[in-house]
Amino acid sequence: MSQEVENSESFERYMVVVAHPDDMEFSAGGTVAKMAAEGKHVTLVQVTSGNKGTDRRDITSEELAAMREAELTESCNRLGVAHIEFFRIGDGEVMPDLVLKERIVRQLRIHRPDVVITHDPFRPYSLHSDHRGVGQSTVDAVYPTARDPLHYHHHLTEEGLEPHKTAELWLSNPEAPDLYIDTTDYVDTKIHALKAHKSQVGDGEHLEERMKQRAEEIGAAAGMKYAEAFKVIKMRR
């Protein structure tokens, strides 16, 4: 059953947690642009800087990371993202362990989002280990770790970072979505943001056609011209 964001007015703070620069834009760029345009506060937690995401041999990992962070910063400016938190974990080195979970919990308790958007770690045949690791760590951080005060008590609670209960988790690129966001008015903003990632999309040839075709395919399932889709897990019961 499809739906749009019927109660988005009650959600003011959004956090996106993704593995690589441009992951947010490809999976949720239209949604982020829409929320920002509606005056919502959007924070991006960027786990890696994509420092190995190239077929070039004339560039170092450090140079590529700096390039991709600059591209991401410009992309976020185009989307209206309020804040970026860079973790700078190595590309391909994401481990869904206690260390990563604590870092995400810290951001949850600092920024206190109503909605968290991340990779769907439960989707069959999700091949990229970074996507799985970030998705799993984020789900585990949201529930129950960020909520319960004794988790990381000495590291976080004693620093004044109080427990936080997120209202909803939105998992991107799910196998069976149940939330469709109408991005018809924001698909061009999404494409404009993606074009900032020159190291990944080059001159952007065919990018607009490809993104609109995909958004149209998703939108067809919900009676919308262009859309993005998510699986929603409601946390506040």
Image: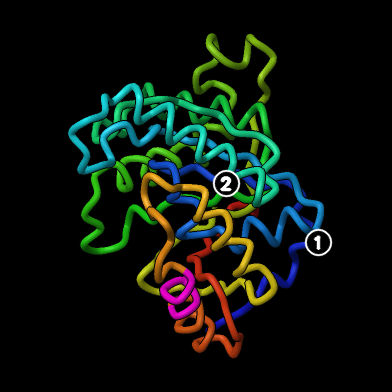
- Quarter of the view holding residue 182: bottom right
Q: Position of residue 9 (x, y in %)?
A: 81, 61
What residue span does the magenta drawing correspond to? 208-213
Q: Closest to the observer: 128 or 116?
A: 128
Q: Say above or below: 77 vs 145.
A: below
1 vs 78, left or right, is left
Q: Residue at x 66, y 58 (%)?
A: 33
Q: Position of residue 172 (x, y in %)?
A: 45, 60
Earlier in the chain: of badge 1 and badge 2, it is 1
Instruction: Inspect this view and state whether residue 144 appears.
Output: no
Q: Residue at x 30, y 27 (%)?
A: 90
Amino acid at circle 2: Ser
Residue receiving disc 1: 9
Which colour scheme appears in the figure? rainbow
Amino acid at circle 1: Glu
Q: Closest to the observer: 29 or 112?
A: 29
Q: Position of residue 120 (x, y in %)?
A: 39, 56
212 vs 187, left or right, is left
Q: Is residue 212 magenta?
A: yes
Q: Main SS of the magenta segment?
A: helix
Mark 1–mark 2 distance (CA, rounded to whole Å): 25 Å
Q: Which mark is residue 75?
A: 2
